[in-house]
Amino acid sequence: MNEHEPDGTAAAPAPDATSHPTAGGDARPSAGGHSRSRPRGQATLSPHVAFMMHLQHLDGIGAHDEAFDLALDAIRAEDKLIAKAEARRAELLAFIHEATLASAREEHPGSDDAVVTAMRERTAQLALATSRSEPVVSRELGESLMLRDAFPTTEG
């Protein structure tokens, strides 16, 4: 089985004579023989790249079962990364939502129409920037506040 680092990425196996460059990388060592940030052979790879590296070396009876297990581990790791990214995105949307409301209320105290207009403008900007429809962005903005306020343990 793969051993994954806490952030969901897989630790790369130590390179050997049969190693090949992956994901646009270069198999040659740097001038000092190792990377400055991590010792050689300790690079952190995406779960998909680690899976593909291991898949190249599978052979013989049980290789399909081992490949399945490796792929399943990689999928689980990718799902963790996706969940973390979605949580960070929700935090940013909640911030944008609150900041937009606060700004509109400061500029136009007591005017609900100004607040609604400000939220529509911000929603349109986000939709354009993220290639999503305005109804989708509007729903995401509302859900971001709900997730943060109603389910604070979700953030963790």
Image: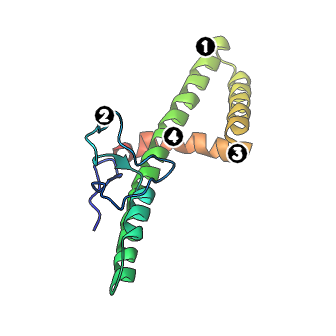
Sequence order check: which comes first, mark 3 or mark 1? Answer: 1
Percent x, y for residue 17? 32, 59
Local packing at callout 1 (Cα closer than 10 Å; few below 14, some 14-19, many 20+) is: few
Give me the C-alpha separation between circle 4 and circle 3.
14 Å
Above-or-below relation of 24 to 108: below
Mark 3 or mark 2: which is in front?
2
The structure residue drawn at horizontal position 71% and vertical position 43%, both measured from the top left corner, is 131
Picture disc at residue 37: 2
Give left or right: position of 139 versus 37: right
Amino acid type for the residue under numbered disc 1: Glu
Residue for badge 3: 132
Residue ID at (51%, 33%): 92
Give the structural element (helix, strand or loop) at label 1: helix
Q: Are marks 1 and 4 in contact (CB under 8 Å)?
A: no
Q: Which residue is disc 4 drawn over? A: 89
Query: Which of the numbered marks, if any, corresponds to residue 106?
Result: 1
